[in-house]
Amino acid sequence: MNKVTTLGQFIIERQSDFPYAKGELSRLLRDIGIAAKIVNREVNKAGLVDILGEHGSINIQGETVKKLDVYANEQFIAALSAGGETCAVASEENEELVQIDTAVSKNAKYIVCVDPLDGSSNIDVNVAIGTIFSIYRRTSFGGTVEEKDYLQRGTEQVAAGYIIYGSSTMLVYTTGKGVNGFTLDPSIGEFCLSHPNMKCPKSGKIYSINEGNYVHFPDGVKQFIKYCQVEDSASSRPYSSRYIGSLVADFHRNLLKGGIFVYPSTLKSPKGKLRLLYECNPLAFIIEQAGGKASDGFRRILDVQPSSLHQRTPLFIGSADMVTVAEEYMMRYSSVEAS
Ligand code: AHM
Ligand code: MG
């Protein structure tokens, strides 16, 4: 029988990668794994909404049925608060930073940024959705968390990961020593190591972009799309177009198979749609650890200095060679936007 390594075992084994670590980060990652299992249980019941009750109605236990993204947010914040390692959470669902009660978090070293349930338009239609998280070390000492604690560059992340609730549920994470993926075995309720040392192919045959917005794209993106669609056997073009509309799902597929995901600036959203702190930075950290690349079209995502909690950024992410070509098109045709 093959040896099964659970997420919990793996995290403990890897603790020795950080000789001065006291186990706090390991405990934090374990707490995220627990919240993920709880959210997974609810996501799996989403199709039963007609039986269990509409959002806002009272269910059989007398509780109000919550929207799944609100529920996921509460679960992650509850798990992180109870764990005692997190002093503040920046969440897509909360306008302001959530400060954890200092009674439980007085020695807490970490700030967590989270998109508790990404791909909201896919929740009700049985299409893969996800959670994205990013962990930073607090830089101030004691008391209220300061802006400089959560507005750190992506290069300062100590860990990042995502959970994909799909045909199976997976948790993928990095602490800066490679990327590892764990698949939830529902029969034992454990995430088991299924994708050790994940690597993104240098190039792929897939491009992922919401082409419905084509007329609003910058010229560099329009030219890059044309490049993807032109016939060229040496580079396996034309590429296939695949767009799920759940960032985690599109990213996960391209990570495994090779490909590029693009969410550029548009006339409607001049800064792009996706959020730097809890969508782009964590995935950028993961893709770089897997040998890929993440850019805003002109510069490395991880180098962007954030100036606000819910800051948006254009995103070009995936196989290194494909992102480099997209950047070349951006620089050649959209140089005005860079300035
Ligand atoms: P959300 O946080 O409201 O779910 O929005 C983020 C999602 C991403 O998962 C996905 O890549 C993108 O929005 C899809 O946007 P669009 O429908 O504009 O293509
Ligand atoms: Mg989101």
Image (cartoon, helix red, strand yellow):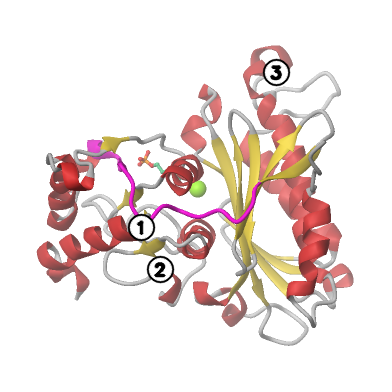
**Alpha carbon of mark 3 to alpha carbon of mark 2: how far?**
42 Å
Residue 80, by quadrant, is bottom right
Of marks 3 and 2, the one in the foreground? 2
Mark 1 — residue?
315
Residue kind at label 1, given as amino acid type: Leu
What number is the disc on residue 259? none
Q: What element carries label 3?
A: loop
Residue kind at label 2, given as amino acid type: Ile
For the residue pair 195 and 171, the one nearer the viewer reads as: 195
Residue at position x 85%, y 58% in the image:
82
How far from the left and from the top, in percent, is residue 196? 64, 52
**Alpha carbon of mark 1 to alpha carbon of mark 3: how far?**
37 Å
What number is the disc on residue 301? 2
What number is the disc on residue 53? 3
> Which of the marked residues, 3 or 2, is nearer the chain's N terminus?
3
How far from the left and from the top, in percent, is residue 85? 80, 68
Q: Tell me if the residue at label 2 has its CB under 8 Å from ligand 1.
A: no
How far from the left and from the top, in percent, is residue 6? 80, 47
Q: What element carries label 1?
A: strand
Magenta residues, as a range?
A: 195-212
Residue at position x 67%, y 16% in the image:
48
Quarter the C terminus occupies: bottom left
**Alpha carbon of mark 2 to alpha carbon of mark 1: how far?**
8 Å
Q: Do the residues labelled 2 and 1 touch (CB within 8 Å)?
A: yes
